Image (tube, rainbow, N blue to C red):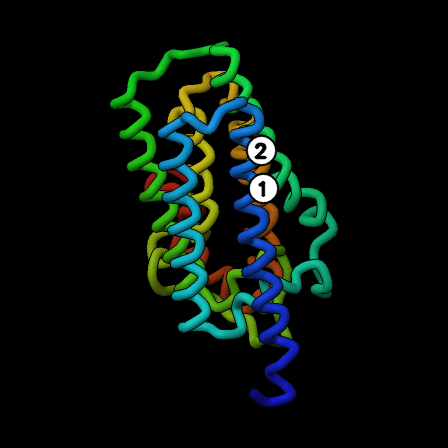
Amino acid sequence: MTQASQPEFRITLRAVLGFVVYLFLNFLILFASAGTLKWGMAWIYFGVSILASLLSRVIAHRKNPDLLAERGSYRQAKDVKSWDKILVPLVALYGPLATIVVAGLDHRFTWTDWFPLWAQVLALLVGILGLVLASWAMVENRFFSAVVRIQKERGHRVCRSGPYRWIRHPGYAGGILWYLITPLVFNSAWAFIPSLASVFFTLIRTVLEDNTLQAELDGYRQYAQQTPYRLFPGIW
């Protein structure tokens, strides 16, 4: 390993370990809120989530070895938009955590019990499609950063392949699907409140990021004209 690659390797390793710890904490928080480990759908939910997350990062690292280093160093990244420093924790941390806390408490105290098993299973299948879409976007786009910034030092350019042929922000589209199915999988109507808040902040971030890219990234405005939909083909 060369001296130049050692810092990047350390950042990548730290990013992967940090993400594993984050998933594990989510796991603990959900079951602590529920007050039980006997919750089959929750085990399946986290199994799918962890498997998809690890596989996507392994594949992304093999295709674009510097991507995880970019994502792992987002706290030290330059030129991050000020508004994104506010939106990132809302979208990626506080919203999802609030959703699983509410879902766990709902399961413990049976505040709502509205959704039949078939609806929970169907929601999970839809969520898997969302994870596949988001993972595909990350694998395809070498500039799939954790924060909104123009990565000049990495030769930032427009990604037009994979799911980007149909929508401009497939990663957000997949994430929104996952946010929406989570309350259904956990059979918690109350969990829709923080889940929909996460969707709302993701939509705001989509608009702001798209405006930034059109203003600052060469070729993106033309790409936006050729690919008119941000998240949902035929809708928006």
Regarding residue 188, the answer to whether it shows in the image is yes
Residue wearing tag 2: 29
Up-down: is 10 above or below 112? Answer: below
Please name the residue shown 30% across and 17% down the image.
116
Residue wearing tag 1: 25
Of 61 and 81, the residue lying toward us: 61
Q: Residues within 10 Å of mark 2 (few under 14, many from 20)?
A: some
Quick one: which residue is furthest to the front in this view? 37
x and y percent of residue 199 in the render? 52, 34
Please name the residue shown 35% across and 64% down the image.
161
Please name the residue shown 36% across and 29% down the image.
40
Mark 1 element type: helix
Quarter where residue 91 is shown: top right
Q: Which quarter of the figure is the C terminus placed in?
A: top left
- Please state which amino acid type lies under the numbered disc 2: Ile
- Please state which amino acid type lies under the numbered disc 1: Leu
Up-down: is 117 above or below 110? Answer: below
